[in-house]
Image (cartoon, rainbow, N blue to C red):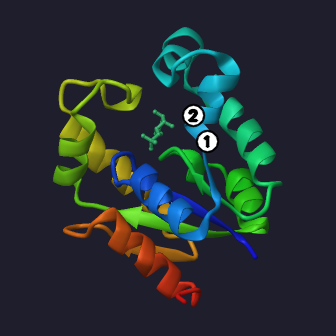
Amino acid sequence: MKNIVLTGFMGVGKTEVGRELSTILGWKLLDVDDEIVKSQKMSVSEIFSRFGEAVFRDLETEMIRKVSRKRNIVISTGGGAVLRQENMELLKTHGVVVCLTALPETILKRTSRNNERPLLQVEDPLKRIHDLLELRKPFYENADIVIGTEGESPLRIAEEILERMGWKR
Ligand code: S3P
């Protein structure tokens, strides 16, 4: 059995879909950002503002190395985790990598509910979302399975992932 790894841009619903998968399969959900926050005793925003993005990315790779050794878990990653080849290689070793997608406007709506995403704390977040999506497109396309989330419930998306993996009972 392989782990299920959820990737995709901020606000596409990785955590919600991860929870549904975890409930259906009875597998633990490990959220890479949450694990970093726990280990550093600092929020992601605080890590970015105090130490910069590069330090966060190193912590992210370190945490991905740790969680990707486990088996039978659902792993939810931060939106930028796909950018390092090393991360993808680690995640693919014991996992099926699924990328969730959504429209920029949906992402904006979902991410503007709080200010926990340092990369979107800019004057024109929609433009930033467009720019980052464009830049990251080839990295997200590296996933084993790509699934659109527009108009679908987290449960339905979780079921579709299992169907696409051939795991639907
Ligand atoms: C980031 C996404 C965030 C978090 C950090 C950077 C990104 O995670 O890791 O703010 O580069 O896209 P979510 O995708 O869970 O919001």
Task: Give the answer, above or below, for where 38 lies relative to 125.
Answer: above
Residue 137 seen anywhere in this rendered image of the structure: yes
Percent from the top left, x then y, of residue 67? Answer: 75, 48
Q: How crowded is mark 2: few (under 14 residues within 10 Å), some or many (20 or more)?
A: some
Callout 1–callout 2 Cβ contact below 8 Å: yes
Q: Quadrant of the N terminus?
A: bottom right
Query: Which of the pair 144/167 is nearer the observer?
Result: 167
Left or right: residue 51 compared with residue 59: left
Q: Does the residue labelled 1 lie within 8 Å of ligand 1?
A: yes
Left or right: residue 149 compared with residue 4: left
Name the residue: 63% across, 15% down. 41
Percent from the top left, x then y, of residue 81? Answer: 58, 47
Task: Give the answer, above or below, for where 58 lies relative to 17.
Answer: above
Amino acid type at mark 1: Val
State the residue position of label 2. Answer: 34
Left or right: residue 40 compared with residue 140: right
Name the residue: 69% across, 30% down. 59
State the residue position of label 1. Answer: 32
Percent from the top left, x then y, of residue 15? Answer: 45, 50
Q: What element carries label 1?
A: helix
Task: Examine the image and state in which quarter residue 2 appears.
Answer: bottom right
- Total residue callouts: 2
Q: Is mark 2 on a helix, strand or loop?
A: helix
Amino acid type at mark 2: Asp
Task: Examine the image and state in which quarter residue 146 appears.
Answer: bottom left
Q: Residues within 10 Å of mark 1 (few under 14, many from 20)?
A: many
